[in-house]
Amino acid sequence: MKHCPLCSTPLNRTLLEANLPAFSCSNCHGLWVSANEYLTWLAPNFSYPLPEIDLAHEFDTPYPVADNNKAILCPDCGRFLRRFQIWPNRKFHLDRCSSCNGIWFDRNEWQTLQAQNLHKQINIFFTEAWQEKLRGKEMQQRFENMYVELFGPEDYEKIKSIRHWLAEHPNGNRLTAYLTDRDPYKG
Ligand SMILES: [Zn+2]
Ligand SMILES: [Zn+2]
């Protein structure tokens, strides 16, 4: 019998979707999905490479999500699950077993992904490429916040549009030289 990695309650068989069996915890409402069952469910519609996920898409959390931050063990093979953040600047993590690839969903995490139609692309979140993209986006956000604070929102918008204008301009280098020259009217 499998037990809940969070609260040790025996897990019950459940069906997440037609043809997608899983295990659920009646106490904390977490879900355990084995890699085999997940991939078997995906198989009829599986296309490779997986469709891109657009980070500009607003990540909604329509349900209260219980995102645990504990080091928990795989209900199948007893190893530590690895915690993956899945969206920039969101406290939303999935726990996945690096050995058997099973996935643990805290309460409402599956439902949240499902509501946004991301539940068929979950394996993307575990890739190095996605994790890197996510970190890049967070870094960008930190710089944005810094500039807004340094310049004020209005001046920041202005300097950003000038920067963009220069970057796109065929004469951009000369314009930049003119702009940064202490006195462009002296030889
Ligand atoms: Zn539980
Ligand atoms: Zn495992």
Image (spheres, helix red, strand yellow):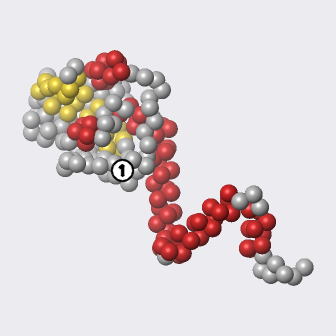
Label 1 crowd bin: few (<14), some (14–19), many (20+), radius 10 Å: few
x, y percent for residue 168: 68, 57
Percent coordinates x, y for residue 141 in the rendering = 47, 59
Query: CB at mark 1 closer than 8 A to ligand 1?
Result: no
78 is higher (above) or lower (below) than 184: above
- Residue 138: image quadrant is bottom left
Quadrant of the image occupied by residue 9: top left
User: Looking at the rendering, in which quadrant would you find the C terminus?
Assistant: bottom right
Left-right relation of 172 to 39: right
On the image, the x and y values in percent for residue 28 come to 13, 41
Q: Which residue was labeled with disc 1?
A: 58
Where is the N terminus found, in terms of image quarters? top left
Which residue is pictured at 14% across the width and 38% down the height?
A: 29
Q: Is residue 162 above or below residue 20?
A: below
- Classify residue 38 by image quadrant: top left
What residue is at 31 percent from the left and 51 percent from the top?
A: 91
| Residue 28 visible from this viewpoint | yes
Front residue of 115 and 100: 115
Residue at point 15% right, 31% down? Answer: 24
Q: Nearer the viewer, residue 121 or 132?
A: 121
**Between 180 and 142, the one nearer to me in the picture:** 180
Q: Is residue 175 left or right of residue 85?
A: right
**Residue 93, percent from left and from top:** 32, 44
SS assignment at label 1: loop
Whether residue 22 is visible to the viewer of this picture, yes or no, is no
In this view, which residue lies farthest toward the right? Answer: 187
Compare residues 184 and 79 and report the one nearer the observer: 184
Residue at 43% of width from left, 39% of height from top?
53
